[in-house]
Amino acid sequence: MTGDDELDREDEELVASFHEHLTAEKGLSEKTASKHVDAIELFATYLEGYEQGTLPEVTGIDIEEYLGDWYIRKVASSRSDLRQVPASFKKFYKFLHERGYLGDEELEDILGACKNPDRYIRRLDTYFELDPDSDTWEQDYERWFFGGLDSGAMGEVMDENQPVDVNLGIGQVVSEGDIESSKTSPLNDFHTFLQYLVSNNGMKLTTVNSFIPRKDLFALNKLMESPEDLKSTANQPDSRTLHLFYNIAKTLNLLVVNEKNRLEVTPQINIFMNLSPKEQFTTLFDAFWNRTEWDRLLQPLNIVGHESVQQSRDAIIAHLATCEPGRRYNFGEAAWKLSVKIGGIDETPEVDSLMNFLTMIIFAERIMPELKLFGLLDCEYKKERDEYAARHDLGIEWFSITTLGETIFRGMANDSGDF
């Protein structure tokens, strides 16, 4: 492949139409649209140079080979850079599907290859770890080259000194002013949480579940700007805020549980604290929304699968992106619409009750309150609730989107191609 490669005429026309679609129909800025178009143009050039066919002929395997090998070796300069490309691919191939260039099965195959960017991120990390000066360079490179996307995915240990991965996609739609003007932000409380754990480094965790012990849980709760009303028998999952912070901090490798079941802080905390407020906010939200398994936010004995809801985050974001800031929406009606979108079924009385149950339990019990904690929405519970509903944060009557929420939800929906 050389720099003299030119795009196939059909590909060139499709890329031009895609650019028009993003700017004229989707209303994206020229800067954002160009970012997506550049990613597609580079991919088209790659296909042409290696005689891999045209853009409409691409399969999921073609995308996996491109992102998991060639792009890493030739282009990727950072994890954030690589993370954005699948989003551009999703937009483009949904556009081709709408124009009749792809069938449903072809689109599903391609979206499956773009679904989990972390697969490519892990492969990039292992590529950057290769040492050309090592005596075993050839063997190490050969092992990496033939290793495949999912090799080393299980049980891997993150480098403590690895830079924090800031989600540039979210960062592009929110400004420092947006964060400062938001009435609610978890940053101050999260800083307090980290400072407490630094001061109590090596804290002995509970034998069951490796949670923060009750004594420290209550001490931390008192330090929060808005302490929660915890019962004397409360455990870590009973605190929405602290349980969220604990899981996010572990996701970001700010904290680790050692072999002696003690909680240790890592040098990543210093790196995180040196980020700007906007970078800290987007990093925390990305860790919550994209990288932390939502079942970790539920009670340990809550036997409810999280996958079907979490895998439908794009549908949730697309719905929230249509909401008008400040307007109150009935949560029951919104939950119904979300369950319809997630289930991929018609809006009829025979709607799958299990899907609606999953939506209410997972989304209402933990996800809606966390979105409120991030200052993206507000909500109010029904005045008359039974004890179980009150204890599990069920019975939301209405919710409304904040200005910050509108900015982030619409930006994320645009990035996923669902808005």
Image (cartoon, rainbow, N blue to C red):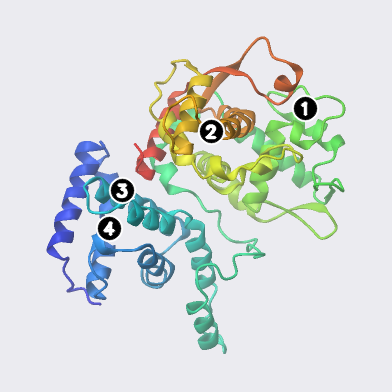
- Observer able to see residue 181: no
**Image quadrant in which you'd find residue 139:** bottom right
Q: Relative to 379, does residue 3 appear above or below in the rendering?
A: below
| Place of residue 397 in the rendered image (x, y in percent of width and height, measured from the top left) | 57, 16
**Image quadrant in which you'd find residue 53:** bottom left
Q: Relative to 140, does residue 66 appear above or below in the rendering?
A: above
- Single out the mark in the foreground, 2 or 1: 2
In the figure, is residue 69 to the left or right of 46? right
- Viewer-proximal residue among 238 and 219: 238
Q: Distance between the residues labelled 1 and 4?
A: 51 Å
* Label ID, residue 222: 1
Q: What residue type is labelled 2?
A: Asp
Of the two numbered discs 3 and 1 on the same chain, state the one appearing first in sequence: 3
State the quadrant of the C terminus: top left
State the quadrant of the N terminus: bottom left
Q: Which amino acid does label 3 sit on?
A: Lys
* Label ID, residue 352: 2
Tell me if mark 1 has few (under 14), some (14-19) or many (20+) residues whose alpha carbon lies within 10 angstroms of its own: few
- Viewer-proximal residue among 312 and 343: 343
Of the two numbered discs 3 and 4 on the same chain, state the one appearing first in sequence: 4
Q: Is mark 3 on a helix, strand or loop?
A: helix
Q: Relative to 329, does residue 412 appear above or below in the rendering?
A: below
Tell me if mark 2 has few (under 14), some (14-19) or many (20+) residues whose alpha carbon lies within 10 angstroms of its own: few
- Single out the mark in the foreground, 3 or 2: 2
The residue singled out by tag 3 in the image is: 94
Of the two numbered discs 1 and 4 on the same chain, state the one appearing first in sequence: 4
* Label ID, residue 40: 4
Q: Is mark 1 on a helix, strand or loop?
A: helix
Q: Distance between the residues labelled 2 and 1?
A: 42 Å
* Label ID, residue 52: none
Q: What element carries label 2?
A: loop
